[in-house]
Image: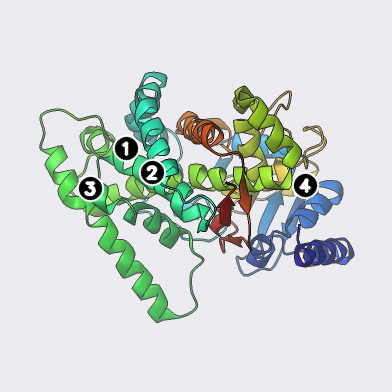
Amino acid sequence: MADGSINLAKDARERAWATPLDQFQVADIDHFVTDTHWPWFERLRAEDPVHYTAESEFGPYWSVTRFNDIIAVDGNHEVFSSSSELGGITIFDGYESSRTTSFIGLDPPQHDAERKVVTPMFSSAGIQAMAPLIRERAAKILDELPVGETFDFVDKVSIELTSQMLATLFNFPFEDRRLLPRASDLILMPPPDDAGELEARQTELMGIFTRFVPLWIERKAAASPADDLISLLAHGAATTSDNPEEFFGNLVLLVVAGSDTTRHSISGALLALNENPDQYQRLRETPALLETAVPEIIRWQTPVAHMRRTALADYELSGKTIRKGEKVIMWYVSGNRDDTVIENPDAFVIDRARPRQHVSFGFGVHRCVGNRLAEMQLRIVWEEILKRFPRIEIVGDIRRLRSNFVKGYEAMPVRIVA
């Protein structure tokens, strides 16, 4: 860790433990950009694990920071709603409108009906059928990397691999694949203060998603669905529509979910291994440890920092009464570092005894539908990296996403050791 990062971490710890709890702003995006959110959540887990913030730029909200409390909220859709009509799934109100909502912004039974439409793509058989193609593409990407030269790992590896996979899942024009992660980034950026910038962002985003309209029309007209997500959605009884606005929601969800978990976990793995060279060496010596290293990477990275719910009724959680209509934020990034449940949670341990004891994929009816595909992509790309390169070193400053929702990376300068 560079001296600047050490000083930032030290300053954050001092401020987190000196700030009165009623003045806590754990959702401050600057905490996430600078990777200094950890002590703020550590303090809440220790002293006020279900914490109420009365005033913030996001309005009032509850922070749920311990593992078991997060499970209690995430697993109770009868009381804690994901409905976009009540505010949706992020701390930002209005992430989705009720007209363009996806199934993640719905409650059962409509949620279940729409989610069921796409599950065939993520079945065990469906995922295994994709494995050879993922390996072929990962190998080609890695074989084209420059050895001994500095390049951006996020761009050359993480984004490229996930954009190719997204294009395959949607059967989207392969030459335009980079538009898909770009759409994800546009969606997840915090709303700008400048109206002109907001309009430009919305125009660019709509330009990307209008490319799906002719694909939808063409595949909807087919006698039966092909093996891609657009076809499944176009033919699904719960998701088919002639109105583009109505099917954009599920496309947005699948683009974001398909891009971000894998993309940021691939990059996060490299950071974790660079910060823990003993674990990197062990993985190089015993690549079979990827079986436990992959879920440990996803826990350690926690690519989705939080999810939001809205209370449908008064509910008591760990001695606090959450009132009907209040916003509840489940901080997955905190639950994954809860030492009352996870042994030595701040350590990166590639052979952890219970590596899948994490909340990175959520819990209950909204558990990530593509979690096994994400794990498989991560495992394959790291199998191929370990075959080729003795070490990939981070050689410059990392630039993190400006987001408190997706915890990820914009740039990571690296060099492959010759």
* Residue at image mark 3: 173
Q: Secondary structure at mark 2?
A: helix
* Residue at image mark 4: 320
Number of the front mark, 2 or 4: 2
The answer to whether mark 2 and mark 4 are in CB contact below 8 A is no
Residue 352 numbered mark, or none: none
Foreground residue among 375 and 152: 152
The answer to whether mark 2 and mark 1 are in CB contact below 8 A is yes
The numbered mark, 2 or 3, whose residue comes first in the sequence reads 3
The numbered mark, 2 or 4, whose residue comes first in the sequence reads 2
The numbered mark, 2 or 1, whose residue comes first in the sequence reads 1
The numbered mark, 4 or 1, whose residue comes first in the sequence reads 1
* Residue at image mark 2: 254
Number of the front mark, 2 or 3: 3
* Residue at image mark 1: 169
Q: Secondary structure at mark 3?
A: loop
Within 10 Å of the Cα at label 3, are there few (<14), some (14-19), or many (20+) other Cα atoms?
few
* Residue 241 rendering spot, x and y as whole percentages: 21, 44
Above/below status of 403 relative to 388: below
Number of the front mark, 2 or 1: 1
Residue at the spot x=23%, y=39% of the render?
240
The three-letter code of the residue at mark 2 reads Leu
The three-letter code of the residue at mark 4 reads Lys
Q: Which of the 4 quarters of the picture holds residue 203? A: bottom left
